[in-house]
Image: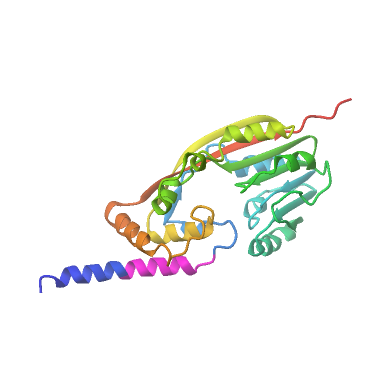
Amino acid sequence: MSGAPEEAAAEAERARFEALVTEAATVSVDGWDFSWLDGRATEQRPSWGYARAMADRMGRARAALDIQTGGGEVLASVPKLPPLTVATESWPPNIARATALLHPLGAAVVADPDEPPLPFGDNAFDLVVSRHPVTTWWTEIARVLVPGGTYFSQQVGPASVFELVEYFLGPQPAEVRGARDPEQARAAAGAAGLDVVDLRAETLRTEFFDIGAVVYFLRKVIWMVPGFTVEEYRPRLAELHRLIETEGPFVAHTTRFLIEARKPDAGP
C-alpha cells in the first residue's frame, strides 16, 4: 500500500503533462501574436521600444513598406499610417490574417516569397521596416528606398534562446551560434550602399513556466528546432516537464538588435 500515493502522484504528473502538451499542440499558431503565452512565459523587452519608434517614423513617412509583416499585428498598431503603406508576407495563413487586419486600415498586403527581387520598382519607398525578418536582403532594400530613405528594423541576434535550442538539438557549432551577429548586418548594409546610423544590441531574459509554453513557442518559431513535433521530441519534452515542475521556470536568453540605415541622398 505504501506505493499507492507515489503511483497516484506519478499518474497525476503524466496526466498534467499530456494535458499541457495536447493543448499547446492543437492551438492555432497563425500570425505573430504571442498572447496565448500570457501567464505561461515571459520575455524581457528591449529598451528601445521598437513598435513605438517604428510608429513615430511611420507618422512622418509618405510611402512605407513593412517586409515579412507576419499577421500584420505590429503594423496595425501604428496610429497613423503613411498615405501609401504596403506589407509583404510569404506564409499563406499569415497573408490571409494580415489582409483582414490591414486592408481596413488602408494598407495593402502583397504575397511575396521573401526572396529577391522585392515586387516593387526602384526608389518606391521613403521608409522600409521589418520586425524579426528571417533574412534581410540588403541590396533589394537599398534598391526600393528613395535617396535619403530609411530602413528601420528589430532583428533576432546571435544564439537567441539557445538554451532551449541546445536542450533539444545538443551543442551547436560556433558558426551557428555566431550567425546573425549585428556587426555582420552593419557590414552587409554598408556593402549595399547604406549608411548605418544606429545599431544597438541587448540580451534579455526569457522564462517558460510550463511545458505547454515550450511546445507552443517551438511550433510558432519554427526555425528554432527545425521539424519540431511533439511525437519526435516526446521523451525530451517529458524530461523538461519534470525539470520545470520540480525546479521552476526554464530560463533562456533572447538576443535582439536594432538597426537603422539610410540611403545616401542623390547627388546634385
In the rendered structure, the answer to whether residue 120 lies left or right of residue 190 reads right
Res 59 seen here:
no
Name the residue nearer the viewer: 50 or 192: 192
Q: Position of residue 217 (x, y in %)?
A: 48, 57
> Where is the C terminus found, in terms of image quarters?
top right
Q: Main secondary structure of the magenta part?
A: helix
Query: Which residue lies most toward the top here?
Result: 268
How did the renderer colour the structure? rainbow
Residue 1, above or below 136: below
Q: Residue at x 30, y 59 (%)?
A: 242
Residue 97, above or below 158: below
In the rendered structure, the answer to whether residue 91 lies left or right of residue 44 reads right
Q: Position of residue 114 (x, y in %)?
A: 69, 52
Whether 163 is among the magenta residues is no
Magenta residue span = 15-28
Residue 26, above or below 110: below
Query: Which residue lies most toward the bottom here?
Result: 1
Q: Position of residue 230 (x, y in %)?
A: 43, 65
Q: Residue at x 69, y 43 (%)?
A: 137
**Which image quadrant is residue 70 in?**
bottom right
Q: Residue at x 33, y 59 (%)?
A: 241
Whether 25 is among the magenta residues is yes
Res 261 seen here:
yes
